[in-house]
Image: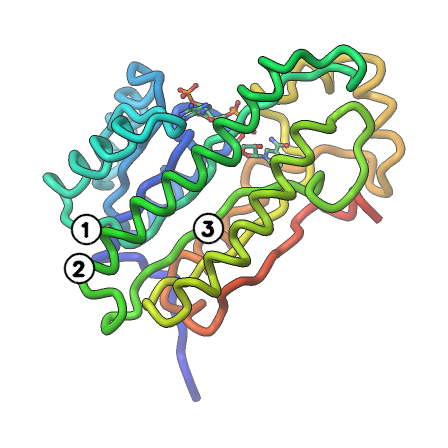
Amino acid sequence: MSGFSFDLSGRTALVTGASSGLGARFGRILAANGANVVLAARRTTLLESLTEEIRQEGGQAIAVQMDVADEDSTRAAYDAAEATFGTVDTIIGNAGTNIEGLALDVEASSLDAILSVNVRGLFLTLREGARRLIAAGSTDRQNGRMVIISSVTAQSISPGTGPYSASKAAALQLGRVLARDWANRGINVNMVLPGYIPTDINIDWFASEGGKRQIQKWPRRRLMGEDSLDAMLLFLSSDASRFVTGSAFTIDDGQTL
Ligand code: NAP
């Protein structure tokens, strides 16, 4: 009989985009399950209050300013994390952005802004983490865990989301390749493709008539709850997923069926 545990005691997890929405939730859940948590984003005031909340619940957390699209900022964030907790062994590549607009109207600057966070920023985050993990002995310790937050839009068609969907497809394929690149380095890389959960990134859309119509087309006619990714996040962050790498998990309450 083999046991398994989602206990993250002794792990240090860096969550990008932890200042709001899913990233803030991930920070809370990882800390509640024993991880030292590094909350990273640009809006540090929000990160500081979340840090305080986690500490009051008995968890361990720090806030670090990090612009994922900026290489120096990314390095500095990992430096700050290491100074407090040691090597980051669990990386949640969650930071993301979207600028809505029909393809005919999308400006080049909007396209660049989306790709710079969702693709460039993700790559810089994971590359920096992998360099440090490998230097710290992950090949022997087999302790690296990376979770990429892609989207169902990586694979299904959502009209009017071309640049965002393309960036999420890139994130999915980037993760597959990095999983192969680092398979012998003790680093697992997996992707989560969430359906729609109300957060700042989509709240205006789902309050609109178009958004309400979209919800009515789904089989269960509902948005997902903020807790919908918790179990998958813990599984992919823990030792329980040691034989899982390069995999993509759709969690969408059937929205794409
Ligand atoms: P959100 O509340 O808008 O969160 C986005 C986060 O990304 C914020 O914390 C933001 O922090 C951070 N971010 C943006 N640009 C950044 C940068 N340059 N450097 C560092 N952090 C940056 O939306 P969310 O729904 O939680 O989104 C989180 C992730 O889930 C995104 O990748 C999104 O594409 C993905 N996702 C969401 C859904 C959904 O339905 N909500 C579905 C599928 C996938 P700062 O502004 O403070 O930097």
Instruction: Calculate the distance from the C-alpha at mark 2 to the C-alpha at mark 3.
Output: 19 Å
Place of residue 94 in the rendered image (x, y in percent of width and height, measured from the top left): 47, 37
Q: Residues within 10 Å of mark 3 (few under 14, many from 20)?
A: many
Q: Residue furthest front?
A: 108
Q: Amino acid at mark 1?
A: Thr
- Mark 2, secondary structure of its residue: loop
Q: Amino acid at mark 3?
A: Val
- Mark 3, secondary structure of its residue: strand
Task: Return the residue at label 2.
Answer: 136
- Whether the residues at callouts 1 and 2 have beta carbons within 8 Å, the answer is yes
Task: Return the residue at label 3.
Answer: 147
Place of residue 55 in the rendered image (x, y in percent of width and height, measured from the top left): 22, 33
155 relative position to 144: left or right: right
Q: Nearer the viewer, residue 148 or 139?
A: 139
Q: Is residue 133 above or below residue 107?
A: below
Place of residue 202 in the rendered image (x, y in percent of width and height, measured from the top left): 65, 21
Instruction: Calculate the distance from the C-alpha at mark 1 to the C-alpha at mark 2.
Output: 7 Å
Instruction: Calculate the distance from the C-alpha at mark 3 to the C-alpha at mark 1.
Output: 17 Å
